[in-house]
Image (tube, grey):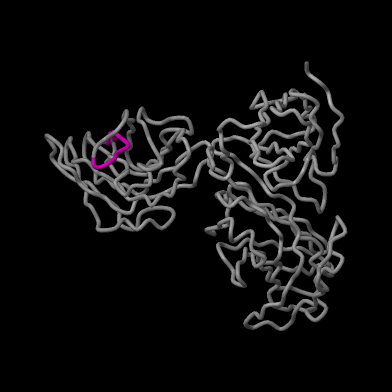
């Protein structure tokens, strides 16, 4: 017999919406791409019947856009070029994920009018081609992207292979006509399954003044900043920085993030409200992420006059910083705002909120529990609307459904062996089912 029970629900904790000043953590399954990686080395491998070869610089030195040292093949009148093996991409793909696809972007060219080069591309490992090749042609100059988020190029690719310095791309070029052919750029993007999550709407608790060389003014600050749901109660104001000033740095910190320790940070978003300049005057704000009192990554900037609200970053923009959960969870993680005015401004930073996006490998150790026979069980899993809780004990016990941060979202009491539990109001993601009983491990629940 299936019994319905009365549930004690804390509606404030069930994650339905994000309101001003309230954070939300959401997790859902997705395919994640970990940026673009460029090779550091190029090797020429002999090819049967070849009549030419690429130059192979000691280091390719990719500058973010193209190679500083470009492999070049001189192809005179219908040539066959030795294989160019590009490797040592410096990847750091999590070891537990399932690879779903690989993209390769390449820029190359420089053939005489009417001439062209045909490129055959393989993925490669330990010096050998793997999978199925792809073909491309170019004349003067061309950039193409091969593969997709669901294309493994006919190969079996593992994280260990991708992270190995021997993994790379092998290019076989054949010319028709005359080409002095250069490979300006080649990069790889790897897609894999993960649990995507976000810790949103975090508000800093404190702000500090950091000296700026050449400054002639500063903000006044009051800690804690406090927030009323719409703006800071004690927002920093440039009382002493009114006419064409260069203010000292503002260092917002102590956001109280709680990102899982096994996550990979994929992006940071920032909402900022500021303003209060006379008509025709503006304040330019340069914004950096910060850690341990120092700026990190690349800056973003905006300017405003009277009042202005701006959003920066995205779920896939980490601001050029190598962020870790330990960093973003630290009280010293924050934001540097550097203000410079033109004209007259009595300027206030009235609101600032940050969201961190991340990815957890699909089989994270932090979510794995003992699968041996236990008193607690439930089905279905994954679930949508309800689960049937199975309690293999004669005494009824309280049970709870928690989020991954340990917050109780729903509580109830078992009535017999089987108890039906409604999941109404639960967003798709990962949760924990826990019993108030000794030696009973929590079980992972997936809501679709």
Left or right of residue 243: residue 261: left
x%, y% of residue 48? 12, 35
Which quadrant is home to the N terminus?
top right
Counting every numbered tag in the picture gives 0
- Nearest to the observer: residue 274 or residue 191: 191
x%, y% of residue 431? 68, 38
Q: Residue furthest front?
A: 394
Q: Quadrant of residue 12?
A: top right
Rendered residue at 32%/44% (across/down): 167
Left or right of residue 350: residue 56: left
x%, y% of residue 36? 45, 47
Q: Quadrant of residue 374?
A: top right
Left or right of residue 421: residue 379: left
Which quadrant is home to the C terminus?
top right
Q: Please determine whether, in this image, residue 88 is positioned above or below residue 272.
A: above
Residue 125 falls inside the magenta stretch = yes
Rendered residue at 40%/46% (across/down): 187
Rendered residue at 69%/49% (across/down): 199
x%, y% of residue 178? 21, 40
Q: Please determine whether, in this image, residue 149 is positioned above or below residue 141.
A: above
Left or right of residue 425: residue 405: left
Residue range corresponding to the magenta coloring: 117-127
Residue 202 falls inside the magenta stretch = no
Q: Please determine whether, in this image, residue 293 is positioned above or below residue 204.
A: below
- Nearest to the observer: residue 332 or residue 216: 332
Main secondary structure along the magenta-highlighted residues: strand
């Amino acid at each position: 017999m299936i019994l319905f029970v009365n549930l004690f629900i804390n509606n404030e904790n069930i994650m339905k919406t994000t309101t001003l000043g309230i954070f939300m953590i959401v997790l859902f399954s997705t395919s994640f791409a970990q940026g673009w990686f460029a090779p550091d080395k190029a090797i020429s491998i002999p090819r049967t019947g070849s009549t030419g070869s690429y130059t192979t610089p000691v280091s390719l030195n990719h500058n973010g856009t193209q190679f500083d040292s470009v492999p070049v093949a001189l192809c005179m009148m219908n040539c066959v070029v030795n294989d160019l093996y590009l490797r040592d991409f410096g990847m750091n793909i999590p070891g537990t994920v399932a690879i779903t696809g690989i993209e390769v972007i390449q820029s190359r060219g420089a053939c005489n009018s009417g001439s062209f080069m045909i490129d055959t591309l393989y993925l490669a490992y330990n010096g050998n081609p793997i999978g199925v090749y792809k073909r491309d042609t170019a004349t003067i100059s061309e950039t193409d992207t091969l593969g997709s988020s669901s294309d493994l190029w006919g190969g079996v690719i593992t994280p260990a292979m991708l992270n190995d310095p021997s993994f790379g791309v092998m290019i076989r070029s054949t010319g028709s006509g005359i080409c002095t052919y250069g490979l300006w750029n080649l990069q790889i993007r790897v897609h894999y399954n993960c649990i995507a999550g976000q810790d949103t709407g975090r508000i800093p608790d404190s702000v500090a003044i950091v000296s700026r060389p050449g400054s002639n003014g500063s903000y006044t600050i009051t800690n804690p900043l406090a927030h009323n749901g719409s703006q800071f109660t004690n927002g920093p104001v440039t009382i002493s920085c009114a006419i064409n000033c260069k203010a000292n740095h503002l260092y917002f910190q102590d956001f109280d993030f709680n990102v899982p320790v096994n996550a990979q940070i994929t992006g940071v978003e920032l909402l900022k409200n500021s303003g209060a300049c006379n008509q025709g005057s503006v304040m330019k704000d340069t914004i950096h992420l910060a850690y341990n009192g120092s700026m990190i990554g690349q800056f973003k900037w905006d300017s405003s006059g009277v009042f202005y609200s701006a959003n920066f970053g995205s779920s896939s923009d980490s601001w050029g910083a190598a962020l870790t959960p330990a960093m973003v969870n630290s009280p010293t993680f924050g934001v540097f705002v550097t203000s410079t005015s033109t004209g007259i401004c009595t300027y206030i930073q009235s609101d600032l909120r940050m969201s961190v996006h991340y990815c957890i490998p699909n089989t994270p150790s932090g979510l794995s529990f003992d699968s041996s026979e236990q008193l607690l069980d439930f089905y279905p899993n994954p679930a949508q609307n309800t689960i049937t809780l199975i309690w293999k004990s004669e005494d009824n016990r309280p049970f709870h459904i928690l989020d991954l941060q340990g917050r109780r979202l729903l509580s109830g009491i078992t009535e017999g062996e089987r108890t039906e539990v409604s999941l109404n109001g639960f967003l798709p993601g990962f949760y924990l089912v826990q019993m108030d009983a000794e030696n009973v491990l929590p079980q992972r629940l997936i809501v679709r």
